[in-house]
Image (cartoon, helix red, strand yellow):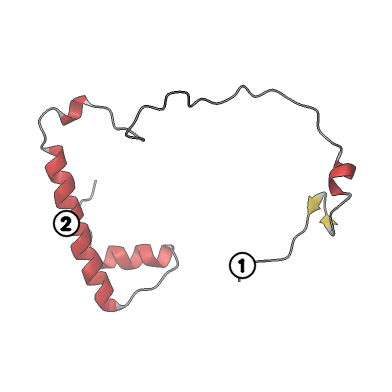
């Protein structure tokens, strides 16, 4: 894994994510990443850290479960589309809301 973040990397990532930054902001962001990577290196040095599995949530989720997926009665397509203004190719057509 490459642990060196360069300004060129950040420019490439910002282009892929389709946002722009001022030139001086890239330098500031690179400095922030350097600090973050140093902190991660410190965490890696904690004795016994490799013995623990990473957690996605810091607390046990008692009672959090997925219900069993059971098929239920549904309405017909005609009934579902009966209240729609515009239907194209068996899909509800809505106006564009993002420029």
Mark found first going from the N terminus, 1 or 2: 2
Residue 24 location, x and y as percent? 24, 77
Foreground residue, 32 or 75?
Answer: 75
Residue 19 location, x and y as percent? 42, 69
**Quadrant location of the N terminus in the rendered image:** top left
Residue 17, quarter of picture:
bottom left
Position of residue 29 relative to residue 53, above or below, is below
Rendered image: mark on residue 98: 1
SS label for mark 2: helix
Circles 1, 2 touching at the beta carbon (< 8 Å): no
Rendered image: mark on residue 35: 2
Residue 76, quarter of picture:
top right
Residue at 81% from the left image edge and 33% from the top image edge:
74
Residue at 32% from the left image edge and 34% from the top image edge:
58
Q: Residues within 10 Å of mark 1 (few under 14, many from 20)?
A: few
Residue 68, quarter of picture:
top right
Position of residue 26 relative to residue 88, above or below, is below
Foreground residue, 36 or 8?
Answer: 36
């Amino acid at each position: 894994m490459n642990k060196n973040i360069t300004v060129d990397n950040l420019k490439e990532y910002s282009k892929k994510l389709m946002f722009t930054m001022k030139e001086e902001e890239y330098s500031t962001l690179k400095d922030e990443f350097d600090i973050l990577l140093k902190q991660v290196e410190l965490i890696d040095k904690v004795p016994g850290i490799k013995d623990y599995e990473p957690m996605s949530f810091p607390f046990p989720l008692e009672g959090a479960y997925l219900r069993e997926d059971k098929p239920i009665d549904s309405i017909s397509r005609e009934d579902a589309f009966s209240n729609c203004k515009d239907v194209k190719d068996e899909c509800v057509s809505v106006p564009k809301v993002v420029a």
